[in-house]
């Protein structure tokens, strides 16, 4: 698999580290409970389109949001995390 | 069989004879030969013994599908087992040895396995060796390994080297036969960047093998067309990535200087054209594995490409029109064709004409029942009751498109009745299949499937390499292993190093015939990488031995080596573990001396490897507040603070000191081991969690060399370099040594007065030499990681073995650091019930009750008198060391309710080392608990 990093261009997957589901949100301000357990431990595992974080460890060391089809590994987009 | 070289013909260079050895005997071939063609040309028919039954075997094919002619290539450290003689390029000095026979190829005592064949049938592993269980390891497995063997790998390190490379192209063409050459030319002329990969050492594919075809089309001189011969594309991966192995120097006895033996290519292609051709199927008749029984297409290859007659009197047996072609080619080469055996009741006109032209008997509606002749075929028995003398049988059961690469990403091949074979189904994105690989065998190809000849005596082999016969497939069918995956595993069909290239489809078809389900219902053939066996060395490339991963050295490395440093790997870094003085021979003596120097005078140590992250911005202090458990907004400029980070799940992550260089400027240090992980975590926090914070950061680990100076005389040494004086946890930016930019920190992990001095990396060595010179009068002594660990241990400072991912701040006695006034990473989860359970093991000091007793990390802590069971386990020893100050081994450990148990005696139970030591539970701070030395 290859990812086209917005900073570094088209690179092999071994340069990146997987960061999991990019749609989960840290439950800031909430007390301990199911929301926190889900945030820390629960991961969706959809068959199909998946937005996920990838870290360009051996490149620019930026976190990226990749949209990937988990059944085909076809990457629809690679974007910088919005600032 | 009496193979020989024809007087003319072929693409070999008859002016360049090449000497080689097979099984110790000298032979001659020509440049352009493979080992197989050279052996056939020299009249060698018997080249190996089969896997299970040790049956004599000859050369079946002329390509990478070869299941029989496997040899050990080269000798000594370069010996490579299971090499297919049909793909080995003949070269001067080539040495090859036959495999799986003893004492010799002609007389193999293990051939007795053939007589025991009833127990070697399908599923024999499962049936025969079930009982008694203990026999498996001790008796059966060694026995089977010796009896059913492959070649021997070299038992010493590979002296050659391998490398990896990447190339990009618009179009990758796989295979340089007629279809591939066409595709490459068209794409290149259209301006695409083209890579043409061909596994053979010359281009042409079947063009080289078929009579009357131009061996090689003119490729011209197109700068955008890169031709890679001796290069096998072995796998297809996501994103248009293809793996290929280039055999750079396999055609040389020894690679040239600095030349790799093989190169693993990662080819990244926008599009790929698979033009890999087709592989011919054997026919399953009795004793179809006799040396001299060959694939018809291979016979044509040996005759037309190599100018070799694989026999002198041939019988051609084909269920398709390849029979006619083969008869014609043999006849044209002056080789007698005794008969053309065609199971079709009404052969095609071309078949009839070819037989007539060659004066060959046409046996229509007839099959070969059995081949006879022990070490080589002598005659064949036909189903019409006649027997024909011959020393060569050219058989063709039809052709299978070489579609392996199309299924590497999950594409399912589809059955095509017209050619009686599988054709590519779903394709990897960007791949097109052309020519024979797509099932396009030309207009003249007609086939009447014949999967097995019935009523034969002798063994009808389907999978030659794994010795799987028609009867084995039938047995699997009877016993219910009917799905194709069960068939494979039960009979081992297709599971040898050839991956069933000549057997999978036939085995599947026989199963379909036996069960009456039809081929599509029985299953399909799918393949995984690599297409052909690949040397592990190619995947390792240069990453072996010391080069397995990069080595990082600090700017002071050379100085440390001069000082007798013994280095140890910490992450990628090499750090001094201890410094051996003349006369010292063990780590403990050296470490004790170093520790004493720090406690009594002054020690110096390289701390460059600690991670350093420069953090700036209006929200820098807020950012630190959120990533550390403790608060940072109150830290004054010019001061440092110890910080602890948790993971979001509430467990301790990393620790270190962070200094405030300015109102909006901090310098964080991390542990050496976690530097990369902490950076990644901070970057996630900054970019993903809190993008609205104004904070920038960069790693400056490699920009600064840093030296720690510790001990009662440390201030004296520092005073020789600067007149800056620092309060405890103070920091100053200044210049030293005639204008070198420097950062001074007053930090201590040893409990002694201590400083850290950072200078730009290029001045690191000068700094350490200067400090050594200035400190000479005070007894300055370099110390290493062992001493650092012991000095920290004596003060109860946690290290990596306590920050092990399973401890909380509370476990480590650092709960008080956790601010209640702010949110931070891990705060909520650190408060969940299991993480604040009072029964949790917590950090304690441990001292042996008996003076002189040795402690070791990993020992379990048990109550006195308790049985050593998991239920009684109350914790474990994490760090140990010998304290020269206390004259005793000391340890840190995690013990359930440990802080309430000071003074109690527990057992350090260490069954691995056979120790059971009573230890006293004490405070983790062993040395100077009042901290008087630090501030005094
Ligand atoms: Zn990047």
Image (cartoon, coloured by chain):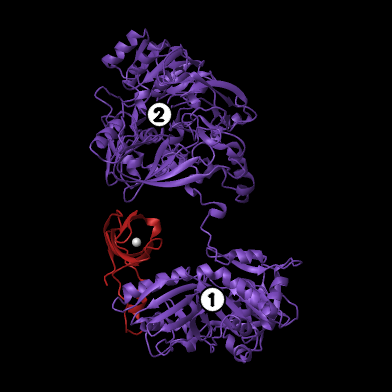
Chain colours: A red, B purple
Disc marking residue B738: 1
Residue sitting at 58 percent across and 37 percent down? B79
Measured in 3D between alpha carbons, the distance from the residue under mark 2 to the one under mark 1, in whole angstroms, is 67 Å
Q: Nearer the viewer, residue B599 or B915?
A: B599
Of the two numbered discs 2 and 1 in the rendering, the one whose residue sits closer to the viewer: 1
Q: Is residue B889 visible?
A: no
Residue sitting at 47 percent across and 69 percent down? B703
Q: Quadrant of residue B823?
A: bottom left
Indicate the quadrant containing the C terminus of chain B: top left, top right, bottom left or bottom right: bottom right
Residue A25: x, y in percent?
30, 75
Kindly identify which residue carries mark 2. B202
Residue B310: x, y in percent?
47, 18
**The CB of the residue at mark 2 lies under 8 Å from ligand 1:** no
Q: Nearer the viewer, residue B263 or B816?
A: B263
- The chain that hosts pointer 1 is B
Q: Secondary structure at mark 1?
A: loop
Residue B479: x, y in percent?
44, 41
B898 versus B150 height, above or below: below
Q: Secondary structure at mark 2?
A: loop
In this image, B28 relative to B339: left or right?
right
Marks 2 and 1 share the same chain: yes
B728 versus B414 height, above or below: below
């Amino acid at each position: 698999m290859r990812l086209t990093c917005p900073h570094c261009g088209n690179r092999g997957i071994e340069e990146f580290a997987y960061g999991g589901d990019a749609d989960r949100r840290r439950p800031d301000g909430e007390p301990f409970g199911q929301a926190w357990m889900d945030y820390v431990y629960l991961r969706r595992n959809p068959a199909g389109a998946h937005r996920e974080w990838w870290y360009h460890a051996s490149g620019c060391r930026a976190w990226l949001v990749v949209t990937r089809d988990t059944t085909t590994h076809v990457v629809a987009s690679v974007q910088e995390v919005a600032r | 069989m009496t193979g020989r070289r024809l007087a003319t013909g072929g693409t070999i260079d008859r002016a360049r004879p090449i000497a080689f050895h097979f099984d110790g005997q000298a032979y001659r071939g020509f440049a352009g030969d493979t080992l197989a063609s050279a052996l056939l040309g020299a009249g060698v028919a018997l080249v190996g013994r089969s896997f299970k039954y040790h049956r004599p075997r000859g050369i079946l094919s002329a390509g990478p599908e070869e299941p029989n002619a496997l040899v050990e290539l080269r000798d000594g450290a370069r010996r490579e087992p299971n090499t297919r003689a049909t793909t080995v390029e003949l070269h001067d000095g080539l040495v090859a040895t036959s495999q799986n026979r003893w004492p010799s190829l002609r007389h193999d005592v293990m051939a007795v396995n053939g007589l025991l064949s009833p127990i070697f049938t399908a599923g024999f592993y499962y049936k025969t060796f079930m009982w008694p269980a203990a026999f498996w390891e001790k008796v059966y497995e060694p026995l089977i390994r010796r009896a059913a063997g492959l070649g021997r790998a070299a038992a010493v390190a590979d002296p050659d080297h391998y490398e990896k490379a990447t190339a990009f192209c618009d179009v990758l063409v796989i295979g340089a036969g007629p279809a591939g050459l066409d595709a490459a030319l068209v794409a290149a002329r259209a301006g695409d960047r083209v890579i043409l990969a061909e596994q053979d050492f010359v281009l042409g594919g079947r063009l080289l093998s078929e009579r009357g075809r131009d061996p090689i089309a003119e490729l011209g001189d197109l700068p955008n067309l890169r031709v890679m011969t001796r290069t096998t594309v072995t796998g297809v991966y996501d994103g248009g990535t293809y793996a290929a192995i280039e055999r750079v120097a396999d055609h040389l006895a020894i690679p040239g200087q600095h030349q790799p033996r093989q190169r693993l290519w990662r080819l990244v292609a926008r599009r790929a054209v698979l033009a890999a051709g087709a592989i011919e199927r054997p026919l399953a008749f009795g004793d179809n594995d006799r040396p001299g029984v060959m694939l018809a297409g291979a016979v044509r290859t040996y005759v037309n490409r190599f100018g070799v007659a694989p026999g002198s009197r041939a019988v051609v047996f084909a269920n398709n029109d390849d029979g006619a072609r083969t008869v014609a080619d043999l006849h044209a080469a002056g080789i007698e064709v005794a008969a053309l055996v065609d199971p079709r009741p009404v052969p095609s006109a071309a078949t009839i004409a070819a037989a007539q032209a060659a004066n060959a008997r046409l046996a229509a509606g007839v099959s070969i029942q059995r081949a006879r002749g022990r070490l080589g075929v002598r005659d064949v028995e036909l189903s019409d009751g006649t027997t024909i003398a011959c020393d060569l049988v050219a058989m063709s059961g039809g052709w299978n498109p070489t579609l392996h690469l199309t299924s590497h990403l999950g594409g399912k091949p589809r059955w095509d009745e017209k050619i009686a074979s599988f054709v590519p189904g779903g394709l990897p994105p960007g791949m097109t299949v052309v020519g024979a690989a797509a099932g396009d065998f030309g207009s003249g190809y007609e086939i009447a499937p014949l999967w097995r000849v019935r009523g034969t005596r002798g063994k009808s082999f389907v999978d030659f390499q794994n010795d799987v016969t028609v009867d084995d497939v039938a047995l699997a069918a009877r016993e219910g292993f009917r799905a194709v995956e069960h068939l494979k595993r039960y009979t081992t069909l297709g599971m040898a190093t050839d991956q069933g290239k000549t057997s999978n489809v036939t085995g599947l078809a026989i199963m379909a015939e036996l069960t009456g389900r039809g081929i599509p219902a029985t299953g399909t053939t799918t393949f995984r990488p690599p297409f052909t066996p690949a040397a592990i060395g190619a995947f390792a490339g240069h990453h072996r031995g010391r080069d397995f991963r990069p080595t990082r050295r600090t700017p002071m490395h050379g100085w440390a080596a001069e000082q007798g440093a013994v280095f140890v790997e910490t992450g990628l870094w090499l750090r001094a573990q201890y410094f051996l003085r003349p006369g010292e021979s063990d780590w403990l003596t050296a470490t004790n001396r170093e520790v004493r120097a720090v406690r009594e005078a002054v020690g110096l140590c390289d701390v460059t490897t600690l991670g350093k992250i420069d953090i700036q911005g209006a929200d820098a202090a807020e950012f630190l507040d959120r990533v550390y458990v403790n608060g940072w907004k109150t830290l004054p400029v010019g001061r440092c603070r110890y910080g602890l980070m948790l993971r979001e799940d509430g467990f301790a992550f990393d620790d270190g000191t962070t200094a405030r260089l300015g109102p909006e400027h901090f310098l964080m240090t991390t542990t050496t081991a976690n530097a990369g992980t902490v950076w990644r975590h901070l970057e996630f926090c900054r970019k993903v969690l809190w993008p609205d914070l104004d904070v920038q950061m960069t790693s400056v680990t490699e920009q600064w060399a840093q030296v720690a100076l510790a001990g009662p005389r440390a201030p004296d040494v520092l005073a020789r370099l600067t007149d800056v004086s620092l309060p405890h946890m103070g920091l100053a930016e200044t210049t030293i040594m005639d204008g070198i930019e420097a950062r001074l920190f007053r930090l201590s992990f040893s409990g002694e007065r201590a400083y850290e001095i950072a200078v730009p990396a290029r001045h690191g060595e000068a700094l350490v030499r200067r400090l050594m010179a200035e400190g000479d009068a005070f007894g300055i002594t370099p110390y290493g990681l062992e001493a650092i660990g012991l000095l920290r241990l004596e003060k109860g400072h946690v290290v990596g073995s306590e920050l092990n991912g399973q401890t909380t701040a509370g476990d480590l006695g650092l709960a008080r650091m956790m601010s209640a006034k702010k949110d931070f990473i891990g705060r909520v989860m650190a408060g969940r019930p299991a993480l604040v359970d009072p029964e949790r093991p917590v950090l304690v000091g441990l001292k042996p009750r008996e003076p002189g007793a040795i402690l070791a990390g990993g020992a379990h802590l048990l109550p006195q008198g308790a049985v050593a069971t998991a239920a009684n386990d109350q914790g474990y020893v994490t760090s140990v060391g010998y304290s020269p100050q206390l004259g005793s081994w000391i340890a840190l450990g995690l013990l359930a309710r440990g802080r309430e148990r000071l003074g109690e005696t527990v057992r350090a139970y260490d069954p691995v080392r056979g120790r059971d030591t009573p230890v006293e539970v004490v405070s983790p701070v062993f040395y100077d608990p009042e901290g008087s030395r630090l501030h005094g």
